[in-house]
Amino acid sequence: MKKLLLALASTAAVIGFASAAAAQEKAKVCFVYVGSKTDGGWTQAHDIGRLELEKALGDKIETQFLESVPEGPDAERAIERLARSGCGLIFTTSFGFMDATIKIAQKFPDVKFEHATGYKTAPNVATYNSRFYEGRYIQGVIAAKMSEKGVAGYIASFPIPEVVMGINSFVIGARSINPDFKIKVVWANTWFDPGKEADAAKALVDQGVDILTQHTDTTAPMQVAAERGIKAFGQASDMIAAGPKTQLTAIVDTWGAYYIKRTQAFLDGKWETTSSWDGLKDGILTMAPYTNMPDDVKKLAEDTEAKIKSGELKPFTGPLKKQDGSEWLAAGASSDDGTLLGMNFYVEGVDDQLPK
Amino acid sequence: MRIELEKRAKISTLFSILSPFIAFLLMIVFGGIMFALLGKNPVTALYSFFVEPLSEVWSLHELAIKAAPLILIAVGLSVCFRSNNWNIGAEGQFIMGAIAGSILPVVFYDWQSPLVLPLMMLMGMLGGALFAAIPAFLKAHMNTNEILTSLMLVYVAQLFLDWLVRGPWRNPGGMNFPETRTFAANAILPEMIASGRTHWGFAFAIIAAILVWFMMRYTLKGFEISVLGQSERAGRFAGFSSRRMIWFSMLLSGALAGLAGISEVSGAIQQLRPVISPGYGFTAIIVAFLGRLNPLGIIAAGLVLALTYLGGEAAQLSLGVSDKVTRVFQGLLLFFVLSCDTLIHYRIRLVWYRFTASDLDGSR
């Protein structure tokens, strides 16, 4: 009996030792979140990506994250803390972490960094982004078909190129169906504030829009749309739970594939800095099921999605005019990425002044 | 049964001094219970929250960076609170100081001179003081409640900053993003010690604390502040003007909050953004009370509150608990400080009495 116990104990010890050693060798992949990981929108989508990464490569890596990290000097400290705690690859998932990421990356040349939606890179800093505007184009097409008044409301966050690009793409999509389509824009000046977003939604509905779309992170606008009996689009995560009879579709950020791809490259020692800007065809964004619409609209939406995926359709293709009526793109010409990434003007059909 | 708070005839000096320590201890105990309920080992959890951040040099630097604005603001607030002027708007004065101080590096970015940095600091103080002058004027001459006016002005300052960085001061080379150009090297507050990021803002905080401590303890002005705070009438008999005191205390605390603002921007952020403070101006109120409204106590209290910020991050990483833990600890601390203080000043008395006929006919 004693011998048996001894044998068991030593086996346990060996196993324990072995697993401890394995844990030691696991690479650490870390994430910095700007919001709470249960925000139902932007940060939650990143966290789902992290969990997918753990599922796919969990035997080789472990993940850690810091949530609700404010942009600014606190971000610098949070990123430094992760770099010091042995993270080999760090994803910083908000635009506002850009300068902090670059600064810390200079201090830790052996650590690799990936910054979401920014434009500054370094030998150990890559950037990644998603062509959200492709999804917005499809939304615009659906909106033009579904709206009776031909006016949609757009709850926007900040007048940065990313957001302006989305507004334009939505309008271009809608005008491909209904050349008189218009949108009204409300600037909420926040990414995440259920109260403000709901107020913006109510203001838009009161102005007579019958479709809502948003570039903010909470489900509040969806709930307002549901209360007022109009249709809406979800943002960043599938928001169907907030509006089972309201959501037409949602742009769902599916970062997991990218996180797995880059972490694999990191593990293989093949990680290099890039500026990645993938779209629908790469699976970095997907459309939530097309719901609450007639079959012909659904068919049209699916066809549009397929055309964007195949490259047959590029949302920013002429003839397109700017808001003031001046020529932007001639017929058949497509915008280059540089113009899109610095976009600071509206196209025709936006009923709003771009804040200067 | 009723619970009554009965004023104590004599307030124990010993316990007045001990109260922050008791509060801290209670916070540790209840924090430990909270961690245990979350299924974490309370000892390791508390270790990673309160000790781990102190075990590394870089992290001590971060502590100093975080504590500097808290101390600087709280020192100014202590003068206000002691003189019975309730300036709740330090957050706004912080922001306006940062804006005023940033005029040189943002608008006159071409001007390279060793004078830039000292001028920035002075303008920062001026900006904070002028913004505090609004509630001071309203209180001194219109008899307005300064708690409301100073608090409301915080939102004015926040929105003004927001407008500036999105509009006139937006970085022309910044792709339309809401931030100003980054400061040139001569507009950046240098690091104090080579081993880390601590900038001169921390030195300002310590110097300000010592100066104000000296003023409160050894000068007539300090005496005036205490007398007017304790009894305005008594102060009047002594020939002190409570109106002048409103101006003095509000301007002083505004200037210090403004200095904290420009130090933070110039030392740590190096540009203006839509949000430059995670609520330093409000957290500093906790710091001021935890430090017994004594500038030297405030230095210690500022470091403790800064530690709760860092500890929250450390606990997130090593334990996987939510970042909200930081807020819970700050809340516990304030709650226990205030309740200890209440119990020092009052005793709890349970009053038992039987209903009598006089209760019923309402003559009681």
Image (spheres, rainbow, N blue to C red):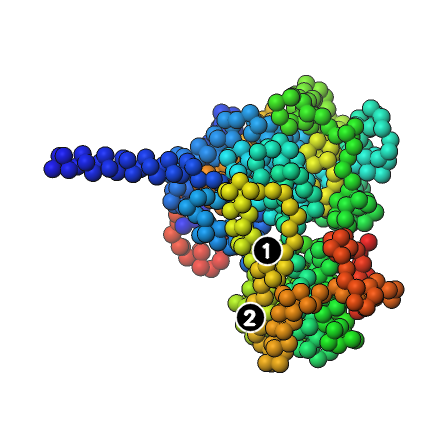
* Marking on residue A42: 1
Chain bearing tag 1 is A
Q: Position of residue B154 (x, y in %)?
A: 71, 45
Q: Amino acid at mark 2?
A: Pro
**Within-10-Å neighbours for mark 1: few <14, some 14–19, many 20+:** many
What residue would you read off at disc 2?
Answer: A289
Same chain, marks 1 and 2?
Answer: yes
**Within-10-Å neighbours for mark 2: few <14, some 14–19, many 20+:** some
Q: Which of A126/A227 is in front?
A: A126
Q: Quadrant of residue B75?
A: top right
**Closer to the observer: label 1 or label 2?**
2
Count the numbered circles shown: 2
In this rendering, is residue B138 above or below B20? below
Chain bearing tag 2 is A
Q: Amino acid at mark 1?
A: Trp
Q: Does residue A309 appear in the picture of this structure?
A: yes
SS at mark 1? helix
> Residue at (54%, 45%) from the top-left corner?
A265
> Residue at (40%, 39%) from the top-left corner?
A23
Q: Which of A294/B149 is in front?
A: A294
Q: Does residue B324 appear in the picture of this structure?
A: no
Q: Position of residue B267 (x, y in %)?
A: 70, 31
> Residue at (77%, 62%) from the top-left corner?
A334
Residue sitting farthest toward the top: B218
Mark 1 vs mark 2, CA separation in Å: 19 Å
Q: Which of B347/A22 is in front?
A: A22
On the picture, is A15 further left or further right than B149?
A: left
In this rendering, is residue B353 above or below B295? below
> Residue at (46%, 38%) from the top-left corner?
B318
Give the mark nearest the N terminus, 1 or 2.
Answer: 1
In this rendering, is residue A199 above or below B83? below
